[in-house]
Amino acid sequence: AFLTVIARLLSVIASEARQSLTKKTLNPKSETLNNIK
């Protein structure tokens, strides 16, 4: 159970990091990326 909690935390941190990076580097392209997703 402890390992699953760590895996969940890492996944959440990774997703937040991806969102922050995309917002910082791809501000003008964020709308197109959201549409593709």
Image (cartoon, rainbow, N blue to C red):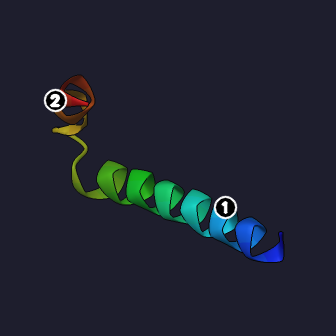
Residue farthest right in this picture: 1
Instruction: Inspect the image, locate mark 1, and give the three-letter code of the amino acid beneath it.
Output: Arg
Pick the front one: 31 or 11: 11
Residue assigned mark 2? 32
Where residue 10 appears, as percent x and y from the top left, is: 60, 69
Residue farthest top in this picture: 35
Where residue 14 appears, as percent x and y from the top left, is: 49, 64
Where residue 34 appears, as percent x and y from the top left, is: 27, 30
Residue assigned mark 1? 8
Instruction: Tell whether 28 sits left or right of 12.
Output: left
Q: Residue at x 31, y 52 (%)?
A: 22
Instruction: Tell whether 19 sits left or right of 25.
Output: right
Q: Is 18 situated above or below 10?
A: above
Which element carries disc 1, helix, strand or loop? helix
Instruction: Tell whether 17 sits left or right of 6.
Output: left
Instruction: Tell whether 36 sits left or right of 19.
Output: left
Where residue 7 appears, as percent x and y from the top left, is: 64, 69
Which element carries disc 2, helix, strand or loop? helix
Pick the front one: 13 or 6: 6
- Where residue 29 sits, quadrant-wise, is top left
Circle 1 residues within 10 Å: few <14, some 14–19, many ≥20: few
Q: Nearer the viewer, mark 2 or mark 1?
A: 1
Q: Residue at x 52, y 55 (%)?
A: 16
Quarter of the N terminus within the rendering: bottom right
Q: Give the Cα distance between marks 2 and 1.
A: 28 Å
How many marks do you count on the picture? 2
Q: Residue at x 74, y 76 (%)?
A: 3
**Contact (CB < 8 A) between labels 2 and 1?**
no
Instruction: Inspect the image, locate mark 2, and give the three-letter code of the amino acid beneath it.
Output: Thr
Instruction: Tell me which numbered mark, 2 or 1, is placed earlier along the sequence.
Output: 1
